[in-house]
Image: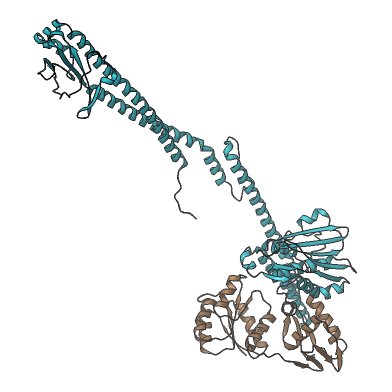
Chain colours: A brown, B cyan
Amino acid sequence: MNILVVEDEPKAGNYLLNGLQELGYSVSLARDGVDGLHQALETPFDVIVLDVMMPKMDGWEVLRRLRKEADTPVLFLTARDDIADRIKGLELGADDYLIKPFSFAELVARLRTLTRRGSSREEEQLHIADLQIDVLKRRVTRAGTRITLTNKEFALLHLFATHQDQVLSRSMIASRVWDMNFDSDTNVVDVAVRRLRLKIDDPFQLKLIHSVRGIGYRFDTLP
Amino acid sequence: MNNRRHYSLTLRLALIFALLAFALLATLGVALYRELERELIKRDDGALIYRADQLRNLLNDSNTLELIKTKPELFQNMLGNSESVLSIAAPGQKPLLLVNPGNIEIPNVTPVPKDHALGFSDVHHLPGVNGVPFATVAASIDSGDLGSLQVTTGRLMTERTAMLASYRLSVFVLACIASIILALVGYLLVHRGLLPLRRLAKHAQGIGIANLAERLGSHGTPKELLPMIDSFNTMLERLAKGFVQLGQVSTDMAHELRTPINNLLGETQVALQQNRSIENYQQLLASNVEELERLARMLDNMLFLARTDPASALRQRQELSAADEVERMADYFEGLANDVDISILAQGEGVIWAEPMLLRRALANLCANAIKYGAPSSELLIKATPDAEGISLSVSNRGETIPAEHLPRLFERFYRVDESRERSSQSNGLGLSIVATIMQLHGGRYSVTSEAGVTCFELFFPRREA
């Protein structure tokens, strides 16, 4: 995946560049709006991460000019938690937004969703190692053993299984599984994951749910 | 804003005074003028009648007739001024005597018969010359040998007209002067009367952030201004209270920020003192992330509380099934509650008219508290009760009774019942104030009771207005 990051703040630009490169993406960094627009028009990117508050040319202007030429997916970053601000961005043709401070895992998840858009087809059968999930019948078996899950446990497992190798943040899990779109002060997600582990992982040698300290959870077959 | 020009009360009142004074004096003047005019006419007419009567008597004497013929100047002198007219003539003949110094055209007036006494009604008023009225009386006289004679006497009322004109002018001038004087006096009086208002304005101007405790004095102000002063002072009271609260919130927030920042700073500095293993660094960074997330959450909550634009929040209101929403809460917290052996019971029906995310946030904050403070092996009850006005949602748990003195302050920002115990990373003291804000946005109510080991929070959402 080819990503352009347009961010004037040096530290933020650097960590975005490093973080995304470490995940195996090819990343270009522009330090201001003018350079960002230039690069965006020169090279075809899969997705653009655009900061709104920048000197010379702000994110809105970059977006406005970019949309005249290309429809590359754009995720904008804003420090202003203002509904009007968000609506403005989406009206200008942005595809998604994140409010600073945001979790890096959340950014990665959003970028993946943006680039996968259109080609995402709901799979009916999921196989991860010896775990089998029948989405339609809501039936889960591991190593031939049938596992009974509650509705929410199933929803959580399904979310994990469809986002393999990705780190999922707690707030993202809360929002996708329970439709709670705010950071709550509770550890509801941790408790739910622990309960799911009890059924999915604990009786087996190979663990599938991994805690990523300080960020959230990852679901994959790596140890 | 209306951009109409502001009028001056003082000027307006002064003008009203002036107009009233003028109108009053002018009316009085006109009435007196009419009376005077009538009296003057009566007097003049009386004089004419008197003269005609005299002539009637005189002319009965034949000597007098002789006298007229020989010494007419005697009669001329008798009339005394140039405005008077006198003619004595036999009908259809040249007058025996004609006194007419002003050369006034003598009108033809029917004479009063001989045996008829003269009265006011016999005087004829004619337009006269140049608008100056002319009064005249004519009478038949029996003069013995000369037979019947006709006496016509009249007078042009120049003097009277001039006098009345000067009277009119005086009335007008006096009315004008009086109204000007009253306008000035009125202006001064009103200006003086408004002095307390200007004093108040000056005082109010001096009240700022530094002396919000100051109140407007009502000493020496008229009764009419007291309600204004009172409401102004009440407003100051509210402002001062709000200001103190705002300052308190800022202070509290700064203190709240201290803990996570202190942790971050301390842990990181200690870690950098010497070389450590990778695991140690990872642990440090993870701990830092925790603190930073706590900061981010607090920031998020503070911004949420500071947002005061209900319109945009309420635009997304929906009719939500109460049964679904309480069930969702039970679902969400089930695991957490099970850990401390609390069972959640969700029941109720009806429709909630609310913004879904805000509603869930409010309920989640209440449920999280209920689980945190709930007694082990007890029940957490989430209930929805609809009525004609809306729907009330209650979250109640068993646990320690909250002392009554804390209850009214529970919804304040950063307020904690027990300072030492609850300063944990799980709580930032904003949860209930967020609930309060959400309820205010929805125009609803919130309350809490805590009795005999049961603490119950109740939220009331008004129903959708038809």
Front residue of A93 and B223: B223
On screen, residue B318 above or below B444: below
Q: State the image quarter where residue B24 is shown.
A: top left
- Give the image location of residue B257, x and y in percent: 71, 65
B392 left or right of B53 in image: right
- Give the image location of residue A207, x and y in percent: 82, 88
Front residue of B458 and B134: B134
Front residue of B255 and B432: B432
- Give the image location of residue A169, x and y in percent: 73, 80
B52 left or right of A105 in image: left
- Residue B339 visible in the current orientation: yes
Q: Residue at 22% of width from left, 16% of height from top?
A: B113
Quarter of the image with the C terminus of chain A in it: bottom right
Q: Residue at 22% of width from left, 14% of height from top?
A: B114
B118 left or right of B404 in image: left
Q: State the image quarter where residue B31 is shown.
A: top left
On screen, residue A39 above or below B362: below
Quarter of the image with the N terminus of chain A in it: bottom right
- Residue B216 visible in the current orientation: no
Q: State the image quarter where residue A153 is shown.
A: bottom right
Front residue of B110 and B323: B110
B313 left or right of B321 in image: left
Looking at the image, the residue that sits furthest to the right is B377
On screen, residue A104 above or below B446: below
Q: Residue at 42% of width from left, 38% of height from top?
A: B15
